[in-house]
Image (cartoon, rainbow, N blue to C red):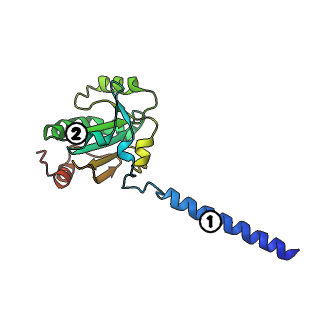
Amino acid sequence: MSFWKKKDNLIITAFVAAFLIGLGVWYEGGPFLPGSASANAFDIPFVDKDQKQLTLNQLKGKPLIVNFWATWCPMCVKKMGAFNRFAEKFQGQGGLVLAISQDRGGLSVVQSYYARNGYKNLAVYLEPSGHLSNAFGVRGLPTTIFIDAQGKEVGRLEGGIDWDSSDVHELINQYFGLSLS
């Protein structure tokens, strides 16, 4: 009897260990490794202010900066004014900035936030399901992904960024060969 009891304990221990190892692999990225997009990330739809569905594949051909954010995210809100100023400069150089809100309250939440703050350089985009940010391996908000004109991720920044800084301008030059000075 004690033999079977020990064997059961051994089997249970093996299953628990396998589960924990699998959980660790999944948590550290699994199919969506942080820093890289899944194969279908560029085909996942999001909507614009007119509720027209778009994908990142449709926007290839120019440098893209995709910023995942939300109105309920304190750091996102804190940095959005500088991001709006940055968007004017970057888009003036031929790039495109997408501030894709993760808000679940609908487009009106984002539109009223933009209106209250006078953001004229950022178009309204929404993807509340989180499928797009998950496919890009986003671990928290805000996260900004830099995508070249061929549709390849060339860099990313997690957390609050000083969009007015020379460091960001250097990154733009490094990633896209554009000068924002």
**First along the sequence among labels 2 and 1:** 1
Query: What's the residue at 13%, 48% (across, down)?
Result: 178
Residue 141 drawn at (x, y percent) = 40, 44
Observer-nearest residue: 2 or 87? Answer: 2
Q: Is residue 146 above or below residue 7?
A: above
Q: Which residue is mark 1?
A: 18
Residue 127 drawn at (x, y percent) = 40, 35
Seen in the image, is 181 located left or right of residue 149? left
Seen as rendered, the residue at the extreme bottom is 3
Query: What's the residue at 76%, 69% (across, down)?
Result: 9
Q: Which residue is mark 2?
A: 96
**Residue 140 visible from this viewpoint:** no
Helix, strand or loop at label 1? It is: helix
**The quarter of the displayed image where residue 92 is located:** top left
Quadrant containing the C terminus in the rendered view: top left
Callout 2: few (<14), some (14-19), or many (20+) C-alpha neighbours within 10 Å? many
Query: What's the residue at 30%, 39% (across, down)?
Result: 79
**Residue 71 visible from this viewpoint:** yes
Q: Is residue 159 above or below residue 83?
A: below
Helix, strand or loop at label 2? It is: strand
**Residue type highlighted by circle 2:** Leu
Q: Are marks 2 and 1 in contact (CB under 8 Å)?
A: no
**Residue type highlighted by circle 1:** Ala
Seen as rendered, the residue at the extreme right is 1
